Amino acid sequence: MSETFPKQQKLKSRKDIKLLFEGGKTITKYPVKLLWLPSGAQETKTGVAVAKRNFKSAVTRNKIKRLMREAYRLHKKEIDGRNKVVFTLLFIYIGKDVASFETIDKAVLGALLKLPSK
C-alpha cells in the first residue's frame, strides 16, 4: 500500500460534504473531530478543515491542515488494511491552540481506529 495522498482520494465534492454534515457520524479525539460516513465510492475520500473563527491567520490554519493531512497519510494504511468498507472522512480541528504534531498524530490515529470494520 502506497503512503501517498493522491488527488483522487481528496474530498472535494460539495455534494459529498453536504451529505457528510447532514447524516455523518462523529468521533472525537481532542483536538480532532472526525466526521465519517460509509461511501459507495471506490476509494476512501478524506478532507481536513480548520475554523477561521478560531485561527484568523491563514498561515496558522494551513499549518494545522498540513499536520492533519500528514498524520492521516501516515496512518491511512491502518483503515485500508482492516476495513472492507469505503468511507467519506472529514477531519475537523476543534482545538483553540496549535497542537504539536505528536498530539495531532495520536488524535488522528485514535479516531481512525474507532471507525467500524466489517
Image (tube, helix red, strand yellow):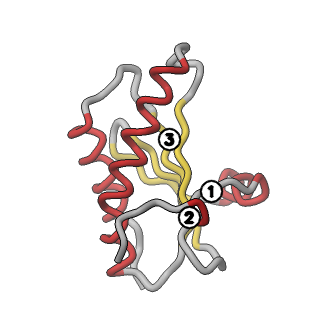
Mark 2 or mark 3, which is nearer the start of the sequence? 2
Mark 3 to mark 1 CA distance (whole Å):
13 Å
Q: Name the residue type under label 1.
A: Leu
Q: Residue 72 got which mark?
A: none
Q: Which residue is mark 3?
A: 92
Residue 49, horizontal then vertical, whole percent: 55, 39
Q: Residue 11 got which mark?
A: 1
Label 3 crowd bin: few (<14), some (14–19), many (20+), radius 10 Å: some
Q: Is residue 80 left or right of residue 62?
A: left
Residue 72, horizontal then vertical, whole percent: 38, 55
**Element type at mark 2:** helix
- Give me the residue at 49% from left, 30% from top: 62
Place residue 58 in its image quadrant.
top right
**Element type at mark 3:** strand
Q: Nearer the viewer, mark 3 or mark 1?
A: 1
Label 1 crowd bin: few (<14), some (14–19), many (20+), radius 10 Å: some
Q: Name the residue type under label 3.
A: Ile
- Say which of 24 and 7 sits in front: 7
- Residue 7, compared with residue 21, is above or below; it is below
Q: Name the residue type under label 2.
A: Gln
Residue 88, horizontal then vertical, whole percent: 58, 64
Residue furthest to the top in view is: 56
Q: Nearer the viewer, mark 3 or mark 2?
A: 2
Callout 3–callout 2 Cβ contact below 8 Å: no
Label 2 crowd bin: few (<14), some (14–19), many (20+), radius 10 Å: some
- Residue 67, compared with residue 89, is above or below; it is above
**Element type at mark 1:** loop
Q: Which residue is mark 2?
A: 9
